[in-house]
Image (cartoon, rainbow, N blue to C red):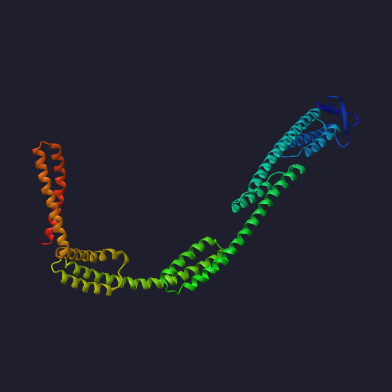
Amino acid sequence: MSSDPWGRVDETGTVYVRTAEGEKVVGSWQAGSPEEALAYFERKYEGLVVEIGLLERRVKTTDLSAKDAQAAIGHLRQQIDEHHAVGDLDALSKRLDALVATVEARREERKAEKAKQTDEAKHAKEALVVEAEELAQSEQWRAAGERLRALVDIWKGLPRLDRKSDDELWHRFSHARSAFSKRRKAHFASLDAQREEARKTKEKLVAEAESLSGSTEWAATAARYRDLMTEWKAAGRAQREAEDDLWNRFRGAQDVFFAARGEVFAERDAEQAENLKLKEELATEAEKLVPVKDLKAARAAFRSINERWEAIGHVPRDARPKVEGRMHAVEKALQETEENEWRRTNPEARARAAGLTGQLQDAVDKLRGQIDQARAAGNNARADKLARELEGRQALLDQALKGLQEFGG
């Protein structure tokens, strides 16, 4: 008979293991000595210890599922319950009990974590739905479309919920995307129609612009081109390819017209600049007639200058007032000289001036006599009043005398 703290072998070769419930038969050993029997079953015990240790580490450090862990624990517990090993089987059972508790705790943790993730996923999907529904009303077609596509990718990366909740949220999400797509399609269909209408309008504008490109009615045609440009801008944009082609034709027609006009205007400007030079020389010649010494000769000279002036033609518009003003000043000086000469030699005017002067002189003399009488009578108030009246009449007399002198008398 042989034994150790956890087992023994009796005379018949039966092997026993000691447990808290008493000895349990492990098996029968007939192939060798009792010591060899105990060593064999102790090695089987050590094997169980290793397996339990490995399972404990797997439960602690890996994502081993609770189901797989429980199956492994059950397998090991069966081996312990069958008592086919010699060692502290009760300690192994306690380790398995502890491992069961750990697995259960892990199960609850994972369940809580999954519930938390599900709740977060639900809130995330609800937020995506709300954003999608807001974007469905947007008219920022490109930005909103890109954002909706990004929301789909985000949705795909989120965990699934229970079927009912997931289906309801997806329905709202999908409906928002469809509503946006429908509005965008209608918008661009309308835009295409507007662009086609703009293309037709601009075709007509181009046709007219091209028909005007050879015109020599410079002012009227330039004005019409300005109107066509206003109509062009009001027509809106056509499709990009058509817009570029139509604009090139429209602009090209204008360029032909304005280039031709520019050449003509350049020639005209050169001619008018030369005309200005000639008229400035005539204005200088006319200005030498002032002050007028011989009215008849000055008049004849001015007529000659004016005839040459009229034969020259147009000058630049901005220079016209100045050069014409110089000629007008000479003409005015001649007219004033002629009027003065006429007044000086007009007998009727001279007679009227002499008569007026005589009347005023009589009135002045009469007032002076009345003033002397009033002062002699001591009526100074009347004398002062008459004196003021005398001042007015004397001023008129002085003016009349000056006018009479102009007639030479």
The residue lying at 10 percent from left, 45 percent from top is: 368
Q: Position of residue 148 (x, y in %)?
A: 64, 50
Instruction: Look at the image and tell me whether residue 38 can be seen.
Output: yes
Indicate the quadrant containing the N terminus: top left, top right, bottom left or bottom right. top right
Q: How many marks?
A: 0
In the depicted view, which residue is nearer to us: 257 or 87?
A: 257
Instruction: Look at the image and tell me whether residue 291 can be seen.
Output: no
Residue 81 higher or lower than 237, as above or below: above
Residue 17 picture quarter: top right
Q: Position of residue 383 (x, y in %)?
A: 13, 40
In the depicted view, which residue is nearer to us: 166 or 143?
A: 143
Locate residue 65 relative to residue 372 in the image: left or right: right
Residue 169 picture quarter: top right
Residue 88 higher or lower than 114, as above or below: above
Residue furthest out toward the right:
12
Q: Position of residue 174 (x, y in %)?
A: 70, 49
Indicate the quadrant containing the C terminus: top left, top right, bottom left or bottom right. bottom left
Locate residue 16 relative to residue 177 in the image: left or right: right
The residue lying at 23 percent from left, 68 percent from top is: 280
Q: Position of residue 377 (x, y in %)?
A: 10, 37
Residue 70 picture quarter: top right
The residue lying at 74 percent from left, 36 percent from top is: 111
In the depicted view, which residue is nearer to us: 352 or 78?
A: 352
